[in-house]
Image (cartoon, coloured by chain):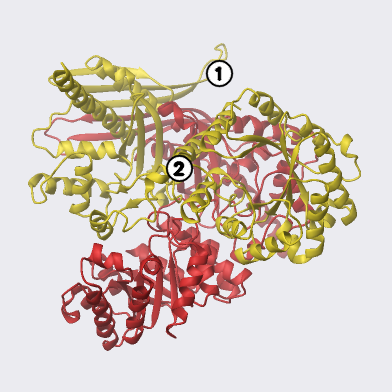
Chain colours: A yellow, B red
Amino acid sequence: MIDKLKIAQKLDELGIHFIEGGWPGSNPKDVEFFEKARSLTLPHSKLVAFGSTRRSKVKAEADANLLALADAGVKVVTIVGKSSELQVIQVLETTLEENLSMIVDSIGYLKAKGLTVFLDAEHFFDGFKVNPSYALRTLEVAAEAGADCLVLCDTNGGTLPNEITVAVEAVRGLTNVPLGIHAHNDAELAVANTLAAVNAGISQIQGTINGYGERCGNANLCSIIPDLKLKMGIDCLTDVQLAKLTEVSHYVSEMANLIPGAFLPYVGSSAFSHKAGLHVSGLRRWADSYQHIDPAQVGNQQRVLVSELSGKANIIYRAKEIGFDLPLRGKEAQKLVEQVKLLESRGFQYDYAEASFELLVHRAKPDYQPPFELVDFMVVVEKRRRPPTKRNLEELLSEAMVKVRVGTEIMHTAAEGNGPVNALDQALRKALLQFYPSLAQVRLVDYKVRILEESIGTESQVRVLIESSDGVKEWRTVGSSTNIIEASWLALADSLEYWLLRQKLWVSLQQSNLLISS
Amino acid sequence: MIDKLKIAQKLDELGIHFIEGGWPGSNPKDVEFFEKARSLTLPHSKLVAFGSTRRSKVKAEADANLLALADAGVKVVTIVGKSSELQVIQVLETTLEENLSMIVDSIGYLKAKGLTVFLDAEHFFDGFKVNPSYALRTLEVAAEAGADCLVLCDTNGGTLPNEITVAVEAVRGLTNVPLGIHAHNDAELAVANTLAAVNAGISQIQGTINGYGERCGNANLCSIIPDLKLKMGIDCLTDVQLAKLTEVSHYVSEMANLIPGAFLPYVGSSAFSHKAGLHVSGLRRWADSYQHIDPAQVGNQQRVLVSELSGKANIIYRAKEIGFDLPLRGKEAQKLVEQVKLLESRGFQYDYAEASFELLVHRAKPDYQPPFELVDFMVVVEKRRRPPTKRNLEELLSEAMVKVRVGTEIMHTAAEGNGPVNALDQALRKALLQFYPSLAQVRLVDYKVRILEESIGTESQVRVLIESSDGVKEWRTVGSSTNIIEASWLALADSLEYWLLRQKLWVSLQQSNLLISS
C-alpha cells in the first residue's frame, strides 16, 4: 500500500497525466488505496479508478462495481466494455444489444455523477477484424452517452501496426471524441502499435513503467515517452521530467521487487554500454558514433564494460575513468589485464562491480597496503528439534567465526545472524569495527546470487553481487566460488575494503580543501 | 566451442537459412569454430563467416581479415562496410572515396574466390538521414561489385518504422540486388522495423534468438518468425519447424547461461499464462478468448498460474490439471487454499514449482504418508590457512550432517560437498539411499537462488528453485527461508519426496499393465 502511494508520487514527478490506481469494485485493498491517496499532493497527475460496465441484466444504479467507482473519491474513471461480438456472445454470454445498453447505461450513470469517463474498448482490434460494424457501434454509442475518451484496446496483443492504423482511421471517421490506445506486447509490437496509433490521431496512451503487465507485458512507457519526445517531436513531458525517466524506471522495479531489466531501451544499465574494442575506440573519436541519443536526456549514462571480451585498451580506459592513468605498456597495466582475465575465468565479472574493479587496480600497484586481511572463517548452520517443553519446536541457528589481520594485529571474533551470510557479515564487521568505528555507517542494500554453469546442480559456480551504501553513495562488489559462503565472504570483504579506501581518500581531500579555504 | 556447435545444430533443426558463426579475422577461437564446424551436418542452414571491408590504404589481397574470411572454409561471407558519411570521416578517418574503394575492392576480392557475399551496410539509416546520396552510393557500388545481398543496418537502433519504409523504398528504386535488414532494439522497435522492411520489399532478415545482443539487443527472431508466419502469411519455416521455436529459445538461453525470459512473446513461460480470475473463467468458456494464437503452434503451452492473486477456483483448476479432482466446497480444497496463501506470504511461489504444488495437494489429504521426514541437519563451512608445509595453503571444507526418519527408523549420516548446499544434498541422498536405492538415478540439473525483499541485504528472504531429473522427465521444487541453507534443504527434500511418490504411482501402474497384458 505504502509502495503504491510512493509510486503514485513518483509518477507525478515524472509528469504522467493520469494514474490508474486500482479497481475499487473488485478489491478492498484498492478502496483503501483511494482513501489514503486523498492525502497525496499530485500537481501533475490525476488519479483514475478502474472498473467495468454494469453486469448484464442489472441496473446501473444497483451495480456494486459502478457504485464503488462513484464512491472512490476521484474525478476520473475508466470502465472496460466489450467491443468484440465473439467476446459478448461467448464470454459475456449476453446479446449484442444488451452489451450496447451496458455501455450506454454505465457511462450515463458515471457522467451524471459529474465524473470524467474513459471507455476501455476491450478486444476492439480483434472485434474490428471479425465484425467491424459492431465494434464501431460500441464506440458510437459510448460517444453518444458522453464518454470523454474512447480507448482502443489490443487486449490479446496480437495486432500488427498497419492493422492498428486502418482501425484507428476508421474510428476517426466516426467521431470527434478523443481516442486512446492500450497495447499489449504479445507480438513484440506494443511500442510500435502505440506509435502507429499516435500517427493515426489518438491522443491518450495507456502503458506501464518498464512494460510490466501480464503475459508479455503492456506497452512500455519508458520507451514510448522518449520515442515520442526525442524522435517524433511530441512534447509530452518537459526536458527536466524526461531526465527522471531512468530513476523512475529503477524505482518502480525496486518497489515491485523485480531486478531492473539491464537491456531495457533508454533506461537499462546496458542501454548505452560499449564492450567490443571496435566500438570503444569509435566512442573515443566521436561520442555519438554508437548511440542513438545522449543518455543524459533520459537520465542514463554511457558505460564502458570491462569484460572477458575486452582487450587491454578497454581496461585502461575504464581505469582512467575512475582516475588511474596507467601507461599502456607499463608493468601495472599488464599485471591488471592478466589478473582480470584470470578472475573472469573463475566466474568474477566486473561489468557492474565497479568497486571490486577499482580494488583490482589498487592491488596491481606494488606499494598497495590493504586496510585489513582475511585469515580464517567458519560458519555453522544447525536445525534441531528441541524437546517439546521449549516454545519453539524447531530452532535454526546460524553462527560465524572470523579471524582478520589489521597491520600486525589479529582479531578473532564470532557472531550469530539471520542465515549464514548475515552471520558472516555481522562477525566481519564486529572484528573490523574495533579498528575502524566509522564502518558502522556502511550497510548492505542489495545481495544477489547468480548460479553459473547451471547444468551441474548444487556443485555450480556461484557469483555473489553485493551493493552497499553509506547513506550518501552506493557501490557494488563481486565474489565468485563454488561455495556460496566463500563467494559472499569475498564480496563482503571487498565492499568494506573499498569503503575504507575511499574514506581515506575523501578525508585527505577534505583536509586539503580546508587548507585551501583557511 | 562445443556450445556454439550445438547451437548451430539446433538452429539448423529450426530451419534457419544462414548462421553467422563468428569473425575469423578478429578471434582465433572463431577460426577454430569454422574448422570444427566442417564436421557438422546441416541440411537446412549455410554457415556464414563475418568480417569487414579491407582497411584503409591496404590492398584487399594483403588484408589479414579478408584472407581469414577466404580461408574460413565457408561458401558465404558477410562483410561490414560503412554507409554513413559522418562515420567514414569521424570514425574511420578516411575519405568518402577511399571508403567506396574499400567496399568495391573487398567484395571483388571475395567474389573472385567464388564466395557468396553479403554486405552489412553499417549505419545505413543514420547515414541516409544526413547524406542520402552518399548512403545510396555505397550500396550502388557494392551492387556493381557483385554483392549478393545488401543488408541495411540500423546499427544504433534509433530509427522509426516509417523512416525504415522510406529508406528501403529509396534503395529498391536503385537496384535489383536482394536487400536485407539488420535492426537493433534501442527504441524498442527492432521487431516492428524488421516487419516494416519486409513490407517494403527486403528478403533477408538478420536477428538473434531471444534478441540477445549488445546494449538493448538485436531484432528478436523468436518474435519475428511467428509474426511473419502466423500473422503476415510469409511461409519462412514449416509448421513442424515453427513448433520447435520455444524449445530452441530455451536451449539457447541455457547454452548462453541466461535465465529464459519469462515474458518473451511467443516463447516465454508467461506468454500464455492466465492469473486473474476473470481471464481464467473466460478461458474455460472459450479457449481463444484471451490469447492471440494457439500456443502449440510455437511449441509453447497455456498455463494457469497458482499465485497470491488467485482464488480458490484457480487452485482447484490447477489441482485438476495434475489429476486431483477436489470438490469446490470440500475441506481439502479449503485447507489447500489456506496452506498456499500462508506459504506464499513466506516467499514460496508455485508458478513454476509444480512438483512442490503437487506435494501440497497430497499433503492436504488426511491419509497422506510421506516417504520420509526431515529431523535435524547441521552444515559447517570452514576456511583455514594451513601450515606452509601443506600443498594447499588455504583449504575450504564443507560438511553436512543430516538425520532423517523413514517409518519408525532414524538415519543419521554425514557427507562432504563442494559448497554447503552440495554437502547437504550428498548427505540427504546418502541417508535415503539405504531405503530407496533407486533414488541414485535422480540428479539436480538446475539450482536457482532468488533474493526477495532485496533492500535488507544479507538478512533477505531467499527463494530456492531446484530442477531435478531422472533422465526421463524433469520436475521443479521450491524452498523459501531467510536462511539459504534451509531454503535449499526444503527444495531438495521436496524434489526427492516428489520423485519417490511418482515412482510409487508409476510402479503400481506398470504392475496393473502387466496384469492386463498377461
Q: Whole-percent x and y of residue B283? A: 75, 53
Q: Position of residue B316 (x, y in %)?
A: 74, 42
Q: Position of residue A397 (x, y in %)?
A: 43, 21
Report helix, strand or loop for mark 2: helix
Q: Which mark is residue B77?
A: none
Kindly report the distance in space between the C-alpha atoms of the residues bearing marks 1 and 2. Answer: 60 Å
For residue B329, say whether it is visible. Answer: no
Q: Count up the numbered dots.
A: 2
Q: Do marks 1 and 2 share a chain?
A: yes
Side of B381 where A387 appears, left or right:
right
Q: Earlier in the sequence, mark 1 or mark 2?
A: 2
Vertical comparison of B98 with A24: above or below: below
Give neighbour class at mark 1: few <14, some 14-19, many 20+ (Cα, 10 Å): few
> For residue A375, what is the image quadrant?
top left
Residue at mark 2: A239
Residue A135 % position (x, y):
78, 59
The local crowd at label 2, few if under 14, some if 14 to 19, many if 20 or more residues have their Cα within 10 Å, is: few
Residue on which the image places disc 1: A393
Chain at numbered mark 2 = A
Q: Could you tell me the amino acid type at mark 2?
A: Asp
Q: Decide which of B53, B424 is in the foreground and name it.
A: B53
Quadrant (top left/top right/bottom left/bottom right) for the C terminus of chain A: top left
Q: Residue at x 46, y 49 (%)?
A: A264
The answer to whether any part of residue B435 appears in the image is yes
